[in-house]
Image: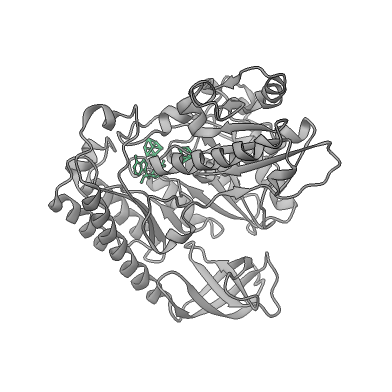
């Protein structure tokens, strides 16, 4: 999953390191106010939209000012130690606020709630409510319990919950792009990763509810949806597995088992004007069928987030990624053969995993040179309690070495991003305008199919327009374009 950067990353984006999202001001006449801060991955942000929806049904409008809030939730991430530290600092801050406003309820949701459970309530006494990712339906009840001064914890992990029937309240929305969760949990056991423990078993959501959500978004003016899961390629829905008979009906036009390629096609057919993206693809599971489906539909964006983690086969084995360097490079070759050079590919990289040698680290750098990633999310290894790696291997690479290796990986990616951007110069591309540029109000920002940001002059354009542009300039991180045509026709 793409991560909103946390403070383990040393890169140009470090300044935005402790990025979190908050709730907007809603005023639909509800009597109480809810403030949510969301950390971590897109799935967590997507979950906050489900939480806002559940709370809205129970009398809460959201607010952007926590001083106004009756209830404050932190939807947390456990992926690296620093991510948890950031949340602890925020909790201390909210506790200081609570001293003057004792009636305010503070809740920890998400992955840290799941990992630490009652500890947050009992040992640390820094919160009133602790709720794991599969128990959000219980939130209104738990808030009421906490208001009575009782212990309010639910960290039950479900094998079925997908929140399929809950229409998310879109938070921080630009009205153009939206996330749709298609599955929850993860059945892989990457040895470094806490997610299987915090999110539970993998389960796929009913494809009808996914298509209905995409249709609803399109009818409300949205132009792009991103299908989210920890490992979207293992999406699988069947009536047997899900104990529902609806898909048995042949007239639905849906085969008995829906795999990720089938789902992608179903969502792509909502409208040629609705772009479809997805994240994250796992190198062991991404199939040629998915690549061919991407090729078949112009509105499926030509971009794949395919985290490699390491370029060395021994390290990959220790990481329990279940593929090796050769397998990964073969998958990249298949992407290039089927989708061509223009398909964007990005990655996640971990520097300084247990026992990694200098030579093995150089294998990561050489793999990056071969693949030529458009961009990457880069981290140094952070041991997580309870994971396979924490149990089996010593976290033996000194911090300075981890940081130096990470800096080398970042420098390599910087060069590759620039090289890839230079290839776009002079090309004509369709971009979708998402918002104003950070630097100037006279410029708007859009994204091309390969997920690269393209800056264009704002004149005559609106957010939500498709624009045909010619790429005229680039920096390592950004493309700049001139407008050729606004809302060109889609055949
Ligand atoms: N499901 C996605 C990853 C989700 S976590 C996948 O399999 O690719 C996002 C990224 O965080 C991972 O890809 C990994 O690069 C990084 N990460 C996870 N655990 C980590 C740890 N213990 N230390 C450092 N980085 C970690
Ligand atoms: Fe973690 Fe691996 Fe699952 Fe990704 S696939 S969430 S890295 S266990
Ligand atoms: Fe996401 Fe962080 Fe949990 S990356 S799944 S919020 S541990």
Q: Quadrant of residue 107?
A: top right
The answer to whether residue 80 is seen in the rendering is no
Name the residue furthest front: 100
The answer to whether residue 298 is seen in the rendering is yes
- Residue 211, position as x, y percentages in the image: 64, 41
Q: Quadrant of residue 467?
A: bottom right
Q: Nearer the viewer, residue 206 or 144?
A: 144
Asked if residue 256 lies left or right of residue 186, the reply is: right
What colouring does the structure picture have?
one colour
Asked if residue 190 lies left or right of residue 396, the reply is: right
Q: Nearer the viewer, residue 318 or 96?
A: 96
- Residue 133, position as x, y percentages in the image: 55, 30
Q: Is residue 144 above or below residue 403?
A: above
Q: Nearer the viewer, residue 463 or 302?
A: 463
Residue drawn 65% across the image and 40% down it: 97
> Which quarter shows the C terminus?
bottom right
Residue drawn 63% across the image and 33% down it: 106
Asked if residue 77 lies left or right of residue 188, the reply is: right
Q: Is residue 212 above or below residue 432?
A: above
- Residue 391, position as x, y percentages in the image: 26, 26
Q: Nearer the viewer, residue 479 or 429?
A: 479
Number of numbered callouts drawn: 0
Residue drawn 44% across the image and 43% down it: 83
Q: Quadrant of ligand 1?
A: top left
Name the residue furthest right: 29
Residue drawn 25% across the image and 63% down it: 369
> Which quarter shows the N terminus?
top left
């Amino acid at each position: 999953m793409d991560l909103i950067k946390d403070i383990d990353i040393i890169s140009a984006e470090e300044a935005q390191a402790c990025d979190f999202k908050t709730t907007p001001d809603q005023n639909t006449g509800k009597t109480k106010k809810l403030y949510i801060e969301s950390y971590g991955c897109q799935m967590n942000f997507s979950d906050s939209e489900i939480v806002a929806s559940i709370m809205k049904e129970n009398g809460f409008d959201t607010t952007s000012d926590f001083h106004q809030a009756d209830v404050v939730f932190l939807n947390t991430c456990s992926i690296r130690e620093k991510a948890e530290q950031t949340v602890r600092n925020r909790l201390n801050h909210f506790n200081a606020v609570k001293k003057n406003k004792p009636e305010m309820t503070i809740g920890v949701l998400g992955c840290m709630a799941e990992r630490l459970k009652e500890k947050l309530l009992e040992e640390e006494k820094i919160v009133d409510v602790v709720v794991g990712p599969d128990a959000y339906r219980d939130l209104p009840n738990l808030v009421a319990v906490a208001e009575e001064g009782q212990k309010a914890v639910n960290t039950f992990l479900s094998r079925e919950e997908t929140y399929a029937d809950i229409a998310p309240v879109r938070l921080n929305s630009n009205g153009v792009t939206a996330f749709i969760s298609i599955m929850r949990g993860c059945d892989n056991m990457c040895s470094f990763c806490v997610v299987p423990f915090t999110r539970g078993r993998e389960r796929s959501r009913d494809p009808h509810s996914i298509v209905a959500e995409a249709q609803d978004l399109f009818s409300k003016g949205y132009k792009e949806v991103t299908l989210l899961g920890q490992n979207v390629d293992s999406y699988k829905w069947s009536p047997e597995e899900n104990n529902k008979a609806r898909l048995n009906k042949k007239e639905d036009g849906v085969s008995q088992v829906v795999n990720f390629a089938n789902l992608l096609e179903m969502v792509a057919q909502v409208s040629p004007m609705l772009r479809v993206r997805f994240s994250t693809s796992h190198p062991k599971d991404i199939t040629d069928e998915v690549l061919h489906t991407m090729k078949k539909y112009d509105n499926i964006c030509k971009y794949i987030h395919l985290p490699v983690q390491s370029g060395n086969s021994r390290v990959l084995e220790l990481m329990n990624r279940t593929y090796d360097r050769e397998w990964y490079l073969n998958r990249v070759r298949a992407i290039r053969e089927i989708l061509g050079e223009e398909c964007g590919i990005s990655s996640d990289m971990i520097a300084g995993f247990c026992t990694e040698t200098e030579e093995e680290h150089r294998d990561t750098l050489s793999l990056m040179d071969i693949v030529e990633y458009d961009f990457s999310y880069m981290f140094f290894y952070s041991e997580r309690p309870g994971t396979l790696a924490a149990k089996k291997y010593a976290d033996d690479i000194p911090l300075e070495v981890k940081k130096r290796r990470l800096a080398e990986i970042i420098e390599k990616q910087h060069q590759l991003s620039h090289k890839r951007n230079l290839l776009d110069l002079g090309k004509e591309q369709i971009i979708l305008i998402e918002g104003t540029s950070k630097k100037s109000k006279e410029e708007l920002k859009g994204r091309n199919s390969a997920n690269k940001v393209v800056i264009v002059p704002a004149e005559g354009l609106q957010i939500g327009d498709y624009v045909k542009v010619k790429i005229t300039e680039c920096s390592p991180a950004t493309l700049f374009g001139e407008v050729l045509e606004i809302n060109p026709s889609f055949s």
